[in-house]
């Protein structure tokens, strides 16, 4: 397939010899339809509209889609993109857009990177992406995960007093056609790029400037790159939506929302007052799949300390699921839990202070009363990775029972960094058929306890390894603070998150 512009013919990207591409110094590449499989940027604007704005803003964008398509196809490409930008960005704080671009979009972009384009892009030394999308929207992903050196994109207009996007763009306007060529000329000067790749006729202007140009034709057989080919793995991400909100998925999600709200209220408040041993049956009746594996320890005998159940952390429901699996009340400890969440929790929930001595005394007192659940990662992780385990729990008991937790959500994530944590369980139960899995492992042998001479760090690392092997998750040394600094710009404590939101 070849296209012509200004007397030049651009061959298909498959004709580019990637074995020789390493000798090229520079490349200028379009994003949508070129480096990405999808030719439409609508799903990514929808994510910004919902995650940096609200569900209502996302609905307005979805309803405006016919107008956007007509403007794009029959008036101008620039006008269609300007409408997308205006509806998605107008009135939003730039800080919120930046956080959503860094915390939400990379996971969806990563699953959409086109293999043959990326192979060409990755072998070049100087990599520049030129796109009609706003720079602040795509730059975090391009630089951190594709290894791009520079993003030449549309610059949004910001009110200097309120630090909010106006919805309009700065001059020279939406970067399409000749404006892409002008941006490349300004960036490279006399040294034009060795390679230029694009996917549509409006890319021909900048491709004609390059020494060699290749078209990336639409293809239903185009495949994404494996996740390990990215410059770094996607371990942390935020946002409520599980699936990419292309028009059909977005429509289905909005149609499901009224039913989901009623269903989640039923799932939460019908089960809240019931004894734990009955809940598995009501869960099944309400469409919640519960998978319990392994031998569940009996309750502690009178006068003996309770078991310390140590689990990886998938959602705030982990301790509740363990209590349901055991058929009895257990206590749990947690960081950054609000008073309202503690009040509404069906099991006793105690907040840790972060002071090691005070927290140790709290945990010891709770174990004297009965069983206790701890999540030593300190925060949830959605991907198949385990964060570093805090070693504090290993010093508190030699009756340690590891529990491997996992869950499946098809529409909404039941965890958040930037959102309101109180709603986390409700979003989990808004999924049509949510699944929770708990696997009880054998109690740690005495020789692997601190009483047997092992250090607390050795015990914590051993428990992390055991759980990782059962779940098939990769172990990391990342912490709660790493996650919150990346996704939310704070250290994850209730006070700092609240103060951060007030200051934004």
Image (spheres, rainbow, N blue to C red):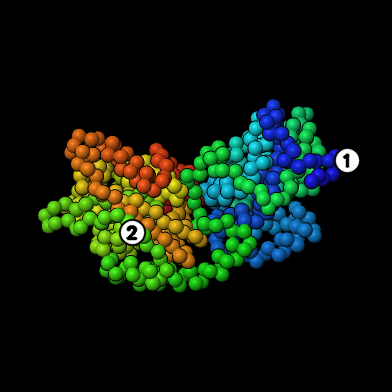
At which x and y percent is residue 367?
20, 52
Give the quarter of the image for residue 408: bottom left
At which x and y percent is residue 495?
38, 50
- Earlier sequence position, callout 1 versus callout 2: 1
Mark 1 and mark 2: span between their CA atoms?
67 Å
At which x and y percent is residue 499?
43, 50
At which x and y percent is residue 363?
23, 49
Q: How many neighbours does mark 2 have within 10 angstroms: few (below 14), some (14-19), or many (20 or more)?
A: some
* Residue depicted at x 49% and y 49%: 237
SS of the residue under disc 2: strand
Relative to 14, is 254 above or below?
Answer: below
SS of the residue under disc 1: loop
**Residue 53 can be seen in this image:** no
Query: Is 400 displayed left or right of 227 in the figure?
Result: left
Query: Is 494 displayed left or right of 255 in the figure?
Result: left
**Residue 244 can be seen in this image:** yes
Q: Do the residues under discs 1 and 2 have CB atoms within 8 angstroms?
A: no
Residue most toward the left?
A: 303
Q: To which residue does mark 1 refer?
A: 7
Query: Is 203 displayed left or right of 481 in the figure?
Result: right
Residue most toward the top?
A: 23
Q: To which residue does mark 2 refer?
A: 292
């Amino acid at each position: 397939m070849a296209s012509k512009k200004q007397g030049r013919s651009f061959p298909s990207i498959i004709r580019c010899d990637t074995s020789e591409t390493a000798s090229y110094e520079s490349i200028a590449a379009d994003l949508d339809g070129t480096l990405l499989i999808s030719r439409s940027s609508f799903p990514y604007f929808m994510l910004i509209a919902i995650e940096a704005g609200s569900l209502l803003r996302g609905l307005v964008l979805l309803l405006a889609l016919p107008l956007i398509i007509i403007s794009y196809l029959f008036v101008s490409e620039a006008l269609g993109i300007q409408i997308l930008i205006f509806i998605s960005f107008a009135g939003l704080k730039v800080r919120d857009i930046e956080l959503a671009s860094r915390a939400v979009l990379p996971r969806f972009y990563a699953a959409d990177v086109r293999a043959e384009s990326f192979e060409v892009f990755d072998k070049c030394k100087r990599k520049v992406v030129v796109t009609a999308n706003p720079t602040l929207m795509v730059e975090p992903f391009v630089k951190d995960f594709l290894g791009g050196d520079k993003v030449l994109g549309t610059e949004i207009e910001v009110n200097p007093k309120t630090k909010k996007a106006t919805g309009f763009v700065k001059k020279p306007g939406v970067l399409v056609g000749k404006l892409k060529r002008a941006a490349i000329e300004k960036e490279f000067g006399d040294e034009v790029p060795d390679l230029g790749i694009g996917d549509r006729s409006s890319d021909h202007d900048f491709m004609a400037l390059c020494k060699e140009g290749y078209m990336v034709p639409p293809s239903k057989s185009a495949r994404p790159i494996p996740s390990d080919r990215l410059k770094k793995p996607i371990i942390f991400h935020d946002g409520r939506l599980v699936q990419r909100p292309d028009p059909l998925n977005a429509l289905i999600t909005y149609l499901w929302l009224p039913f989901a709200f009623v269903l989640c209220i039923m799932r939460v408040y019908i089960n809240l007052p019931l004894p734990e041993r009955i809940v598995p049956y009501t869960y099944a009746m309400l469409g919640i799949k519960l998978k319990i594996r392994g031998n569940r320890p009996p309750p502690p005998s009178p006068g003996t300390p309770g078991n310390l159940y140590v689990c990886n952390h998938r959602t705030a429901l982990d301790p509740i699921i363990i209590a349901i699996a055991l058929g009895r009340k257990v206590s749990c400890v947690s960081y950054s839990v609000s008073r309202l969440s503690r009040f509404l929790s069906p099991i006793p929930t105690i907040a840790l202070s972060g002071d090691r001595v005070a927290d140790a005394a709290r945990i010891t007192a709770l174990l004297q009363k009965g069983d206790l659940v701890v999540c030593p990662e300190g925060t949830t992780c959605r991907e198949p990775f385990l964060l570093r385990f805090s070693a504090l729990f290993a010093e508190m008991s030699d009756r340690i029972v590891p529990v491997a937790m996992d869950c499946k959500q098809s529409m909404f994530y039941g965890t958040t960094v930037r959102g309101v944590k109180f709603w986390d369980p409700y979003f989990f139960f808004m999924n049509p058929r949510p699944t929770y899995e708990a696997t009880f492992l054998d109690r740690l042998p005495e020789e692997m306890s601190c009483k047997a001479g092992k250090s607390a760090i050795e015990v914590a690392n051993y428990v992390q390894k055991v759980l990782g092997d059962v779940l098939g998750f990769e172990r990391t040394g990342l912490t709660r603070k790493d996650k919150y600094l990346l996704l939310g710009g704070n250290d994850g404590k209730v006070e700092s998150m609240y103060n951060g939101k007030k200051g934004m």
